[in-house]
Amino acid sequence: MEQQEIAIKTWLADNHSRGVKLLQRLVQERSVRGEESKAQAIIIEKLRRLGLSLDIWEIGSPELLNHPDFSCDRKNFYGNPNVVGVWKGTGVGRSIILNGHIDVVPEGDLNEWEHDPYSGVIIDGCLYGRGSTDMKGGTVSLLLAIEAIKESGIKLKGDVIFQSVIEEESGGAGSLAAVLRGYHGDGAIIPEPSGMKIFPKQQGSMWFRITVKGKSAHGGTRYEGVSAIEKMNVVINELQQLEKARNQGIKDPLYENIPIPIPINIGKIQSGEWPSSVPDLADIEGRMGVAPNETLTKARAEMEECLRALEKKDKWFQQHPVKIEWFGGTWLPGNLEEGHELIQFLTQAYQKVRGNFPVIEASPWGTDGGILSNIGHTPVVVFGPGTTEVAHDCNEYIVLDHVFEAAEMIALTILNWCGVSDS
Amino acid sequence: MEQQEIAIKTWLADNHSRGVKLLQRLVQERSVRGEESKAQAIIIEKLRRLGLSLDIWEIGSPELLNHPDFSCDRKNFYGNPNVVGVWKGTGVGRSIILNGHIDVVPEGDLNEWEHDPYSGVIIDGCLYGRGSTDMKGGTVSLLLAIEAIKESGIKLKGDVIFQSVIEEESGGAGSLAAVLRGYHGDGAIIPEPSGMKIFPKQQGSMWFRITVKGKSAHGGTRYEGVSAIEKMNVVINELQQLEKARNQGIKDPLYENIPIPIPINIGKIQSGEWPSSVPDLADIEGRMGVAPNETLTKARAEMEECLRALEKKDKWFQQHPVKIEWFGGTWLPGNLEEGHELIQFLTQAYQKVRGNFPVIEASPWGTDGGILSNIGHTPVVVFGPGTTEVAHDCNEYIVLDHVFEAAEMIALTILNWCGVSDS
């Protein structure tokens, strides 16, 4: 094995600028929702050159649309395909899915960016741009791992199934489509921005919208109305109490260093139409974290119960109950059993490359891992070179060295997991 | 006097249906901003028949546009004039301005109206339609008062200056234009919907927009960001404290029954773009009430100081100061001195017509009275037949009896104020 490991390390070192160039090109394509095609085209071309069997399809089959875990408000997938490339093994090893998503979140306030969000500019060993960390950097680690193994002349026993999916940021419809198309594996690695930590468990999540009523009045006699903004703040306060209670219940040591294992995030609020009127309606949109060992149904019920309890505390809510909708994305939690061999192999690979022991933790966010594991019955580990801190933020970047380190660790894990063919 | 008072009462009773018809025709013209001409045409025709000297002009002179209290975003006044009709007195009495605005606010959600907003339909003694209460009903009271005096053969010593102005609802550019054209009076009555209360003082107001910064992060690790919504609530709390402090300082007995004499109304908030992100920006829009004896400048300074004080209490604001803008409409406060003769005469007239004592209060909103008094140096009282409760609302209406009662009270006040000529 040692010789093959050296070959991989050497190949990665020799092909540094090619890897960087690939990532740069991917970041430069603005693959926000509905505009994934150009970035996917780069992936397709790369997979074609690697000699993988390609499967390119537009998602949206009736089976997908009617699946109970399909969570997506997008109407049209035309022209923006899912991409899978399969490298068949010699047939007697374990298969592995390598899954990355190509969609990026919107760039937010452009004034906050020091460079164009799609510049791909490199400064001090970091590559900047929306999607660099979440998760085109991780996807490039996967592609480099495959290429390093191939170019080192290694043949694997098990299949490598590379997936570049759409719609992760909005609820995982792309990965669900891949599962329903028949892609399963004996294991899976998803290089979401874990900051080189190993995440056997992942926080699930789902979106909610709460509508709060008030009573309008002229601002000059605001006491004649009931401000929906004030009532909204009562609701937000209640959600903060619920968050506290839910997190106190989490004892898993993997969450030991995480301040709020399953946060309730208020992401968006809107109320009122006119400065001099008392607003009679307020909307809250947010994300509820779901524990690895919890179902979405149970978490939903807890929030709904909390909102109903408001009606006993406050007469206004008794007469004007708040409305809750679960809309948009849901991300199933991931819950890989303790001591799973995939974790062992990845830990060993990490130690070989970095010389120290990796942090093994629970992830603060859901990934498509929930779909691959809960629906596709594929054991999943999340491990990648980006960092949560800069994901979804302005001036998003990735440390290029981490992309290559992750590529090497993933390549070594694949060798162990799939097995190296002697022939 | 008594004979003249009886003549006026009789004339009003005899001409009920003509008065109603006039109001109905005015309500049926949709005189929203930019479309005031047809309603003004009815006023012009009425003034012509009454034999008043007419002054009809399109506002927008350089003097107006450059005036420090000009607050208007309208670009074009072409074809929608201000109208003034003057009835010259015999020359030795006090003059009076009778001011009404012809513009109405938009009708809002049409589905909420039981009848067409411009039907002018009469049901159980109430006339329905946008502008009926705010303030075409009041304008008709003025016209009926003038006509009743004239038709009773009474001649006045002082001038009566009737004004039908545009742009009150958007900040008073029409009345400001009338002041700048040289119209001043020894007193003025503005029959805004006071619900037959007498308002010697009026709350002024202005609009503000406050921008609050946060630090974005992924919702799953929300503890890594700073929620602009949470920081916005700190600001709102501070504004509530400021409102409390400002209102505690108000000892005027006219505000005795008003829960919050000069409210700070939060009318509109917006923050965040994505349910699973921590929002990094929040906008607050609202209306600040200004006390009758206060200047806009002083009120502005108090709010700005309050926001600056936040920087000492909270490091976040020290590093990320909130931004405040004063935008949109401003309405100057009105402040008639206690025991002014105009109030005395109106009170006596009220007692003669209704047999009881009127409510004398401070108004919860600004009117063009702020412009007439602060800039035109004309003492102003606000008193009219409509009601605040239905102004700007769907199914706006006015009690027709109140239109005639107000007309009679205003006529009697005019007799006293301007003086009746013996000749």
Image (cartoon, coloured by chain):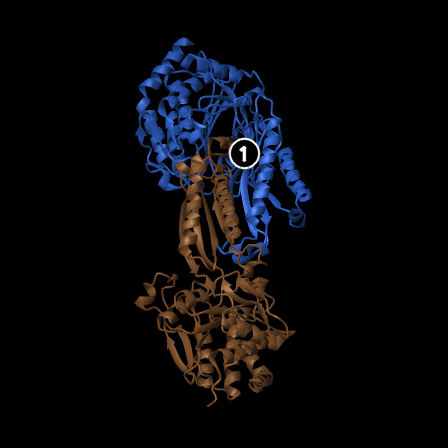
Chain colours: A blue, B brown
The structure residue drawn at horizontal position 57% and vertical position 49%, both measured from the top left corner, is: A228
Where residue B163 appears, as percent x and y from the top left, is 44, 75
Disc 1: which chain? A
Q: Secondary structure at mark 1?
A: helix
Image vertical order of residue A203 relative to residue A13, above or below: below
Q: Which residue is mark 1?
A: A176
Question: Is residue A234 visible to the viewer in this orientation of the structure?
Answer: yes
Q: Quadrant for residue A412, please give it.
A: top left
Q: Quadrant of the C terminus of chain A?
A: top left
Where residue A301 appears, as percent x and y from the top left, is 65, 37
Q: Nearer the viewer, residue A184 or B144?
A: B144
**Mark 1: few, some, or many residues within 10 Å (few <14, many ≥20)?**
many
Q: Inspect the image, locate mark 1, and give the three-letter code of the amino acid beneath it.
A: Leu
Image vertical order of residue A352 relative to residue A74, above or below: above
Q: Nearer the viewer, residue B357 or A229?
A: B357
Question: Is residue B99 visible to the viewer in this orientation of the structure?
Answer: no
The structure residue drawn at horizontal position 42% and vertical position 39%, both measured from the top left corner, is: B311
